Image (cartoon, rainbow, N blue to C red):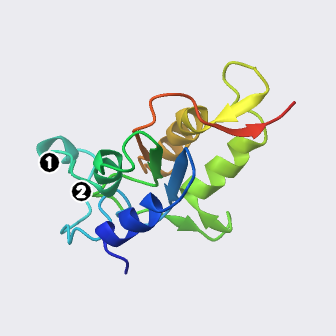
């Protein structure tokens, strides 16, 4: 396992103006925080507050990354990401790939941004698998991933 700080330092060395990090892993919102996780039934969930201090939040606060990184994680810190054999990979990856084919272009401008991708993929993962993808966006503007023109 790579500690949060090490990954943040590696990312900070990139010369890119914008960095998109996608983590389709269990507890990806928390990474190596040693968060004790457990399954919570839907009716009991309101009794437990969301864990907030996740990896994505740390990255968007990292001094040399804050204005140039956005992080998409497969689930909340207290959830497990699912890998579905029929899909061939994780749930988040499946919906991201499906949306990259075009339906995520919300404003029909011929490009798909990281923000649009999350906006369309996250509800599908929630609806079909009760997994809640998260996005932490330190960039604050649309980041084009695909030009479909």
- Rounded to the nearest angstrom, the CA distance separating label 1 from label 2 is 9 Å
Task: Please indicate whether residue 30 sits to the left or right of residue 10 in the image.
Answer: left
Q: Position of residue 31 (x, y in %)?
A: 33, 66
- Which numbered marker is on residue 40? 2
Q: Secondary structure at mark 2?
A: loop
Query: Which residue appears at 45% of the width and 36% of the height?
Result: 139
Element marked by disc 1: loop
Q: Which residue is mark 1?
A: 48
Q: Nearer the viewer, residue 1 or 126?
A: 1
Q: Is residue 53 left or right of residue 66?
A: left
Q: Which mark is residue 112?
A: none
Residue at 30% across, 49% down: 63
Disc nearest the viewer among 1 and 2: 1
* Residue 16 percent across, percent down from the top left: 57, 51
The residue lying furthest to the left in this view is 47
Q: Nearer the viewer, residue 47 or 53?
A: 53
Q: Is residue 83 above or below residue 145?
A: below
Where does the image place residue 27, in percent across and percent down from the top left?
34, 63
86 with respect to 143 (left or right): right
Residue situated furthest bottom in the rendering = 1
Instruction: Please name whichever residue, 3 or 82, is drawn nearer the observer in this view of the structure.
Output: 3
- The residue located at (54%, 33%) in the rendering is 119
Q: Relative to 126, is 74 above or below?
A: below
Q: Who comes first in sequence, dot 1 or dot 2?
A: 2
Contact between marks 1 and 2 (CB within 8 A): the answer is yes
């Amino acid at each position: 396992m790579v500690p949060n700080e090490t990954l943040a330092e590696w990312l900070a060395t990139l010369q890119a103006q914008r960095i998109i990090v996608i983590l389709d892993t269990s507890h990806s919102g928390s990474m190596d925080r040693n968060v004790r996780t457990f399954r919570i039934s839907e009716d009991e969930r309101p009794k437990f507050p969301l864990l907030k201090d996740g990896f994505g939040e740390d990255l968007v606060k990292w001094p040399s990354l804050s204005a140039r990184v956005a992080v998409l994680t497969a689930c909340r810190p207290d959830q497990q990401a699912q890998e579905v054999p029929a899909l061939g990979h994780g749930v988040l990856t499946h919906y991201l790939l499906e949306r990259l084919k075009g339906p995520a272009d919300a404003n029909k401008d011929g490009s798909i941004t990281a923000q649009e991708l999350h906006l369309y993929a996250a509800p599908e993962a929630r609806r079909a698998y009760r997994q809640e993808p998260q996005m932490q966006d330190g960039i604050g503007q649309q980041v084009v991933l695909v030009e479909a023109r």
